[in-house]
Image (cartoon, rainbow, N blue to C red):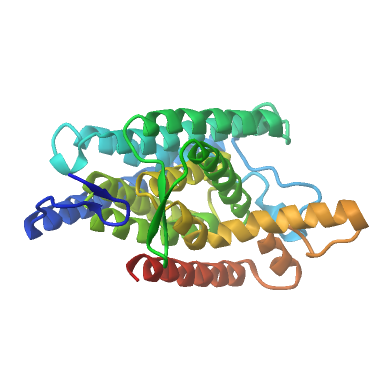
Amino acid sequence: ADCDLKHGIIGAKWSDNMVYSAWMTAILAGVICLVIMLMIMPGLIRYLHKIKFGQTEREEGLESHKKKNGTPTMGGLAFILVPTIIYIAGSFILPDMRFSQNILIILLAYVGYGLIGFLDDYIIVVKKDNEGLKPGAKFLLQAVLAIIFFMIYRSGSSTEIWIPLADIYIDLGWAYFLLVVLMFTAENNAVNLTNGIDGLCAGLMVIALVPFAVFASVQHQYPVLVLIIMVIASLIGYLRFNLHPAKIFMGDTGSLALGGFIAAVAMVLKQELLLVIIGFVFVAEVLSVIIQVTHFKRTGKRIFRMAPLHHHFEKGGMTETAVVHRFWAAGILLAALGLLLYFL
């Protein structure tokens, strides 16, 4: 059958029963992930405390954050492994959790970028080197993974992108390769920079993934739908222990994995441009750093009180919780805008 980038396969028969079955599978799998996360997180926190895998706050950071020193990090391991293992197990049993090229790309991105983050966290926590992976090495590893995903994706998918509002398709050809590399590396670093205060990154990711679950359902990509719901549920379970005052942080392990996950989801659902809109809070965070550094190097003056952007508001006197709630509200508005543009 022909493929429409916005609505999926044209001419296929999709009964109400199939849609209902997919959502029931997604909800059931999500509940299982949520319950497991709530069960294992206390033990993981105790274990990370025991082996002294704790956060080290920067000396130049906010004074109010210094008390977070020693809080367990690498909590992202839980919300990476739980949905990944459950999905793989379920793929042997349930048709709505079958393996496909799209699922392979998403899981490889999720676990692959998580491994890069784990290596970074390991160097910081175990080797006591606050710099972690050198920026050049981290970027190279991220780019190599993006190239691998592109090669897998290109073997069976289009290099066209859908333009919202205009409702037209443009074939980028090999330029799509540059878009993929940019999308993965930029999204990774944007999500990573957003992971600076309790509950902010995980909450924004839950919000941003909801429209993509809708897109997957409309396009009849039910395995992708199920996996997205499982990750959302796992993040909600993690948030129970990450809200202020956080008992655990996701570390680069979690933030890089989430950046890779949402970039891969946007790619396989052909919503590359809507990713920028839906995830614009992440974009704003990374832009604030770029603007701050560039302006300071040129003039010796700062535009923001502190970058990334969430620290600017904190330094202005806003409480950590207030910043998180306002950023979440912005994320909800952007997610709604993304859905609106999709269906117009």
- Residue 95 drawn at (x, y percent): 14, 40
Query: Is 202 or 244 nearer to us in this picture?
Result: 202
Query: Viewed as shown, does residue 110 lie left or right of 185?
Result: left
Decide which of 79, 181 is in the foreground and name it.
181
Residue plotted at (60% across, 50% down): 190
In the picture, measured across the screen, residue 245 lies left or right of residue 29, that is right
Q: Residue at x 48, y 68 (%)?
A: 334
Seen in the picture, residue 150 relative to 305 is either above or below; the reply is above
Q: Nearer the viewer, residue 278 or 235?
A: 278
| Residue 205, above or below 90 | below
The C terminus lies in which quarter of the figure?
bottom left
- Residue 266 location in percent, x, y? 41, 49
Q: Nearer the viewer, residue 38 or 224?
A: 224
Residue 293 point in image, percent of width and height = 80, 52
Q: Quadrant of residue 168?
A: bottom left
Image quadrant assignment for residue 261: top left
Q: Is residue 291 left or right of residue 321?
A: right
The number of discs equals: 0
Q: Position of residue 130 (x, y in %)?
A: 73, 36
Q: Residue at x 8, y 56 (%)?
A: 15
Q: Quadrant of the N terminus?
A: top left
Snapshot quadrant of residue 155:
top left
Q: Identify the residue at horizontal 16%, vertical 55% (top origin).
A: 24
Q: Give the farthest residue toward the right.
A: 300
Residue 245 vs residue 94: left or right?
right
For residue 134, say whether it is visible.
no
Q: Is residue 234 visible?
A: yes
